[in-house]
Amino acid sequence: MEDHIKIVKDFYSAFQEKDAEKMARHYHPDVVFQDPAFGKLKGRDVPDMWRMLIKRSTDLEISFAVAQETGPIIKAQWVADYTFSKTARKVHNIVEANLRFRDDLIIEHIDKFDLHRWAIQALGLKGALLGGTGYFRKKLQKQTNALLKKYQETK
């Protein structure tokens, strides 16, 4: 487990450094990722998501703490501070991550955060009104996945 904690620290340190390639090296080829913004992603879509997010960011700042190991899962908390490009609003997003390993690579990565809180910060009144709904979650996931596919077509 100590090795897995070291891997998680290295993964998030690479994120702080905006080094998506180093992050990608920690993923198993069959990785499954899930979060409120993208829904479920698999395989190459996962590192491509980080590549896209880092490439699109202008002022992204990451902090993290590896909280604990719970059986086969490493729990970490990370925080993203950035300006949401569509509205130029500041976002402070607190994320709880659960990471599971296979062959000393991340095979499952589940990020949880308060989507309604995020929507209020990123979108203001519109986010306050709609950010807590299933409709909003589905629409956001459709948009983020379309951005990912467009990114993959141009890389």
Image: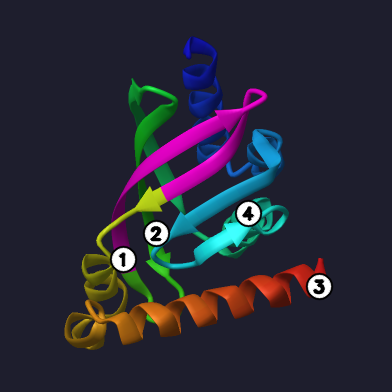
Q: Amino acid at mark 1?
A: Lys
Q: Amino acid at mark 4?
A: Val
Residues packed near mark 2 inside 10 Å, few (<14), some (14 to 19) or many (20 plus): some
Q: Disc 1 and disc 3: Cα gap in Å?
A: 28 Å
Q: Disc 4 and disc 3: Cα gap in Å?
A: 16 Å
Q: Which numbered dot is residue 46?
A: 4
* Sooner in the amino-acid sequence: mark 4 or mark 2: 4
* Sooner in the amino-acid sequence: mark 4 or mark 3: 4
Stretch of the chain drawn in magenta = 90-110
Residue at which label 2 appears: 82
Q: Residue furthest front?
A: 71
- Comparing marks 1 and 3, which lies closer to the viewer? 3
Q: Disc 2 and disc 1: Cα gap in Å?
A: 6 Å
Q: Disc 3 and disc 2: Cα gap in Å?
A: 24 Å
Instruction: State how many labels appear.
Output: 4
Residue at which label 3 appears: 154
* Quadrant housing residue 28: top right
**Mark 1 and mark 4 in contact (Cβ < 8 Å)?**
no
Q: Amino acid at mark 3?
A: Thr
Residue 62, horizontal then vertical, whole percent: 42, 43
Residue 35, horizontal then vertical, whole percent: 43, 59
Residue 80, horizontal then vertical, whole percent: 38, 51
